[in-house]
Amino acid sequence: MTGRSLRAASASAAALAAALLLGAAACTAPSAGGTRAADGSTAVVGIAYEPDTLSPLLGYGKDGNSKIFDGLLAHDADLRLRPALAAELPEVSADGLTYTYTLRRDVTFQDGEPFDAEDVVFTYRTILDEKTNNPSRTELDALRSIRAEGSHTVVFTLAYPYAPFAQRTVLPIAPEHIAGRQDVNTGKFTTEPIGTGPYILTGWSKGEKLSFEANPRYWGGEPEVERFTMAVIQDDDVRATRLRAGDLDGAVLPPALAEGFARDRNLRTHRATSYDYRTVTLPTGNPIAGDTAVRRALDIAVDRQAMVDGILNGAGKPAYGPVPTGSPWFTAGTERRHDPEAARRILDEAGWKPGKDGIRTKDGVRAAFPLWYVTGDKLRQDHALAYASDARRIGIDITTQAGTWEVIEPRMKHDAVLAGGGAPGDPDFDQFLLLHSDHAGDGFNNMARYDNPAVDEALEQGRRAGDEAARRRAYDTVQRELVQNPGYTFLTHIDHVYVLADTWDGLSTQVEPHDHGLASGPWWNVETWTPKGTRR
């Protein structure tokens, strides 16, 4: 592959993004509360979750848009790769094993120290170090070595041709002179980071807010939004209330709550297509949820379209796996129709017989298990309740329970969880960590402890094959295996809905991952916003 062919691949990614964005619209909405900054110089937005760390060495910002940091490359609005800390897209050797990046020479970190190739080498080598607590290390599995050639050239050498490697280099770069002088897992850098990005972190009150100020040294030009605050509000209803009261300039909201602002002329609603799915983990170690017949029955008993219509107000689509139906990587024919009668037959044939109360039993075991969702997350709650209702109609008793992640995480090995995930771009990005048995029980990777040798082999083939046709066959295999033994019940892919004050020009959305908040949302490019009535 050459630098020219990489640019062609980037254009192909843009075509994917354009296809997925069809139907995602921004519509005018009214506002009940005033904005927090009449001149547009500040913005306060409400998000649902905050990260565990702000260190890219531990996984923060790995998909780009981190605000504090920059990667070698970045994504534009259409998900095409563009240069960031690199001066241009990389040159790629004909065998696809060597990527050479030429770096910008006008970049300094937020403390004034210059950025150079050694910072890039330090960042990647630290992430690959087994002593570093980075849960996404295997995303760089293809990387054999990295070296600096002078101060402004970096060369990556791969162990095998990995088609989407350039997309991995949106990963933020950390300063060696700061992060390299402290414990990578526990040092101050994890909560008080310094980067090259457009915003400087000025404060992080965990569970409350993150505060940023514009970086006057930013190589891309000082942002016109001078102060940017992300208020951490996990409860959807509270976020909507604070937006209505004027405490917030914008917020991410479930579609039903966003509708309540439709008559406010001072607000606009922004809708982003995403890879963000909601799924139910079916732990392999659970005697009911781990039964293949139960998994297959639940997979066709669930009414996905009713969830899209009733829970998402049409802002999404049915999900049959991590790959959205609009993606060119989706395998046609793996859609599952809503068929409760067929689900009952599967259970009957497997020996799960209805009792007097309608709940099935087998060998003295009752078909019942709990399903956890995060407290305050209305979308997860509604999905969980709908799933439990559909399950009961075929004789499976699912009890929904709410809790914090601190409560839920110790129970994930045996209890089902209403989970979320999804990443745009290459199918390897999400499926390997989600489905490969090597990641069973690895934190929030493969939460269901799914173990399918055919899927493991296909995921390895998809990751390592240099030929696109071979990769496509591999991921087709994965998706067909999920029909025969689901492991998870995928429910919906969700459009993200945001309501913001109509105060700035330049707002747009990208095709988004599951992780929306700091990285995604209409503020993905907040550094380029301009107050209404001004020109940049």
Image (spheres, rainbow, N blue to C red):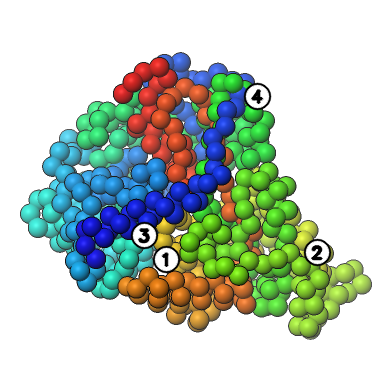
**Label 4 neighbourhood size at 10 Å, few (<14), some (14-19), many (20+)?**
some
Q: CA distance from mark 3 to mark 2?
A: 40 Å
Q: CA distance from mark 3 to mark 1?
A: 18 Å
Report the amino acid beneath label 3: Asn
Q: Is residue 440 visible?
A: no
Residue 428 numbered tag: 1
Identify the residue at image location x=29%, y=47%. 82
The foreground one among 109 and 317 is 317
Q: CA distance from mark 1 to mark 4?
A: 42 Å
Residue 279: x, y in percent?
A: 61, 60
N-term-proximal mark, 2 vs 1: 2
The foreground one among 222 and 269 is 269
Res. 390 image quadrant: bottom right
Identify the residue at image location x=30%, y=62%. 165
In this view, the mark in front (3 or 2): 2
**Label 3 neighbourhood size at 10 Å, few (<14), some (14-19), many (20+)?**
some
Q: Going by the image, does 283 lie left or right of 1?
A: right
Mark 4 secondary-structure assignment: loop
Residue that numbered label 3 is attached to: 134
Residue that numbered label 2 is attached to: 392
Residue that numbered label 4 is attached to: 263
Q: Are marks 2 and 4 in contact (CB under 8 Å)?
A: no
Report the amino acid beneath label 2: Arg
Q: CA distance from mark 2 to mark 4?
A: 39 Å
In this view, the mark in front (3 or 4): 4
Mark 2 secondary-structure assignment: helix
